[in-house]
Amino acid sequence: MGVKIEKLDFIDLFCGIGGFRYALENLGHNCVFSSDWDKDAQATYSRNFGDFPHGDLTKIKSHDIPPHHILCGGFPCQPFSISGKQHGFADARGTLLDEILRIGKFHTPQVLFLENVKNYLSHANGATLTTTLECLRNAGFDVFYKVLNASNFGVPQKRERLYFVCFRKDLGIYDFSFPEPCNSDVALEDILLSPKSSNLEGLYINRDDLRLSANIDHSRENRSIRTGTVGKGGQGERIYSSKGHAITLSAFGGGVGAKTGMYLIDGKVRRLHPRECARLMGFPEEFKIHERRNVSYKQFGNSVAIPVVKRIFQEIQKSLFNAYRKAA
């Protein structure tokens, strides 16, 4: 008899607006629990999935969480992010890894699937990562981790994130390969709203100190292409070409181009619209966006790139299939 991956139950911790959920449900799996303490994120999640996430995870008993095969969690990155103050585990949000460990030890899911910022690797000179790996292994999991860039997975956005895939030790999965890059020809211009759209009002940048490069290359490239600056040209003051990839969407950060970056589009410079941000993260067109722009920018900046998460989980499925087959 053949062995196949049945529908797996998963929980969606620090769920935000549901990036993990979209990816796993698209592969046929079933969300049995979600949690986030941000009220706006809860509202957006509820509008799109029909169920309202539970609140503060630290106040939820482990036995009140349903049994599950997969624990997903993009645990808060601000304590470790370059955009934040990098307080790490000294920040209350940094200790939320303890909540993942608490639930993981109680329910012993087959897989912990976690995401954080690239800076997690080097935070506190690597001590944060060392502590994390030790805790995950002591909780009964074999741990694999790697930084992947959404630019390499059909997403026209430079978004480097650290992913942890942790298999329960008794599964005997000692070798796991993250997906290989698939450098498809995509550029920011492919996901833009029509220039005639009325939704673009208020996004255009008109300043006396706006400076564009003298020689702008109009060829498409799978990278961010700087074409100019405003002000002193610092973070949030750089202009990029729509022929290349977007810079990383951010929940925070300042400057004229805060959160989305600024782009030269059809001869004009503007920030991105929330719908364009949704597309850059892989959300479907029917996704219901929060009505306030600043809130939606924050939500997409905090989310995961759905195509990357989906590709990683396809590899997780392969490893689970092989483990089941050996055990059969």
Image: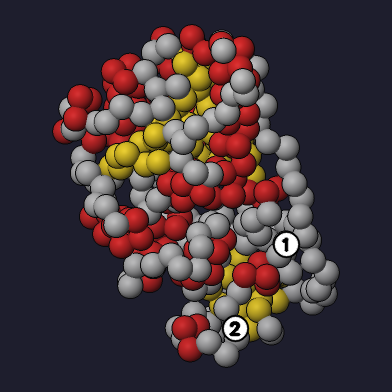
Quarter holding the C terminus? top right
Would you say 136 lies left or right of 155 here? left
Identify the residue position indicated by label 1 in the image.
Answer: 186
* Disc marking residue 194: 2
Amino acid of disc 2 = Ser
Q: Tell me if residue 301 comes above or below residue 142 in the rendering.
A: below
Mark 1 and mark 2 lie on one chain; the one further toward the N terminus is 1
Q: Residue 204's spot in the image, x, y percent?
A: 53, 82
| Front-lying residue, 86 or 164 | 164
Residue depicted at 67% across the width and 26% down the height: 177
Amino acid of disc 1 = Val
Q: Residues within 10 Å of mark 1 (few under 14, many from 20)?
A: many
Q: Residue 80's spot in the image, x, y percent?
A: 44, 36
Would you say 149 lies left or right of 101 here? right
Quarter holding the N terminus? top right
Q: Residues within 10 Å of mark 2 (few under 14, many from 20)?
A: few
* Disc marking residue 211: none
Q: Residue 5's spot in the image, x, y percent?
A: 54, 30
The answer to whether residue 90 is visible is no
Would you say 203 lies left or right of 32 here? right
| Front-lying residue, 86 or 322 | 322
* CA distance separating discs 1 and 2: 17 Å
> Secondary structure under badge 2?
loop
| Front-lying residue, 87 or 315 | 315
The answer to whether residue 148 is visible is yes
Residue depicted at 73% across the width and 56% down the height: 223
Would you say 328 lies left or right of 70 here? right
Q: How was this image coloured? A: secondary structure
Residue depicted at 49% across the width and 44% down the height: 28
